[in-house]
Amino acid sequence: MSPNARIPEGAPHPTGPGAVLDLIRSGRATTRAELMAATGLSRSTMATRLEALTEAGYVEEAGTGGATGGRRAQSFRLRRDGGVLLVADIGGAHVRTAVTDLAGRVLDGRERTDDVGLGPAPVLDRVADDFRDLLAAAGHTADRVRGIGIGVPGPVEAETGRIVSPPIMTGWDGYRVPDYFAGRYDCPVLTDNDTNLMALGEYRTAHAGEEHLVFIKLGTGIGAGLVLGRRLHRGAGGAAGDIGHSPAPGVDENAPDALVCRCGLTGCLEAYASGWALVRDLRELGHRVDTTAGVVSLIRDGHPDAVRLVRQSGRLIGRALADTVSLLNPSSLVIGGELAYAGDHLLAGVREITYRRSLPLATRELTVTTSRLRSRAGTVGAAGAVTDVLYAPATVDAALSRNP
């Protein structure tokens, strides 16, 4: 497996055990009759597949489903208790960690403030401490960990888990997060951009019936996660969705007054509409505010300067998203991150400009909503990404062929 755990390449057998498990795990088919109809396999072959998956600990009987020919149909489900997952959502100023079962159900979790700019060793040391404490509290040991998922607020090279030129992650450039955990746990370690994982978590939890979704994180920074054709789209190298460092609409990046972004370029959307940009602008107006959370408090209190600036941010973001909507034509645009819950001011601006500036056909069925998972989106998505690796049909087929 590559240093950064990914779903293996190569087409799995279309009716192999891995394909059967994928049907069960997704809920598309859970009874023998449903599985046979979905795969075209005979009753005896399906019995062999289910026996192999059951004996290997992948699935278990889940009681009875609907009646078939006068009898209650036996159904199957993913076995949750064969181990645990450890997941972390590292943001610019926070860290959320959790231990989950193998279906991604959170057993225990914690959240604390932290500064990602302190560098990889201090931040990951505290994540490792959290993991150890969470395992102990849940009654598990390190040998029960089947996978680890880590979200970070910067670009991640898809194949290696190496962080590449992150604007806000001082000291992290070139660092491979999977290497940190390699000596601590004997399991796959997946590292991804935090917004990608938020998009996956939101899609799986609240939008699973849709084909295409764009998730926008509006917090200290700005990022996007893309679910296209029911799959998380990372791009050729892992940089897809970095909308925060595209040019801000209507801004001449070469103008003398173009604002400098944290990435070092001028005129980025993030330099005008993000949480840190609002902190900067409010401080210049004489307000004592240091964090995005402080900005949100001012907005909720109805402070005129904060309300005016966040409305302006919403319109800028809406103009940027209008291009995204016209280009990708998603059915859902989901807004998350701290700024998404600062009242209706920002969301109203996003909706107003997105609908007005996008192609009419692209917005005909478009919904613009806030994240239902809120702060849990990153950890839920991290668990989902790890289970996608563990239960990839090719991986399951290979594991069962080694242990017939």
Image (cartoon, grey):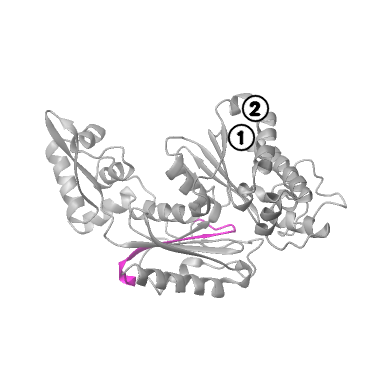
Please state the horizontal and vertical placement of residue 153, each as a whole percent of the image.
58, 59
Q: Give the range drawn in magenta.
A: 140-158
Rendered location of residue 247, percent (x, y): 73, 46
Numbered-mark total: 2
Which residue is situated farthest in the right direction here?
Answer: 256
Q: Residue furthest front?
A: 301
Specify whether 44 is left or right of 332: left
Residue 338 visible in the snapshot: yes
Quarter residue 12 falls in: top left
Point 61% across, 62% down: residue: 92
Q: Which amino acid does label 1 sit on?
A: Val
Q: For numbered disc 2, what is the local secondary structure?
A: loop
> Gap between marks 2 and 1, in whole Å?
8 Å
Say if mark 2 contacts mark 1, CB within 8 Å.
yes
Amino acid under label 2? Leu
Magenta region includes residue 141: yes
Does 330 lie within the magenta span?
no
Q: Residue 325 carries which label?
A: 1
Rendering coords of residue 16 (x, y %): 24, 44
Q: Is residue 99 left or right of residue 48?
A: right
Which residue does the image show at 15% across and 49% down from the upper left? 51
* Residue 359 numbered tag: 2
* Residue plotted at (62% across, 72% down): 118
Q: Can residue 8 be seen in this view?
A: no
Q: Closer to the camera, 130 or 187?
A: 130
Residue situated in front as seen by the camera: 102 or 94:
94
Residue nearest the observer in this picture, 271 or 373: 373
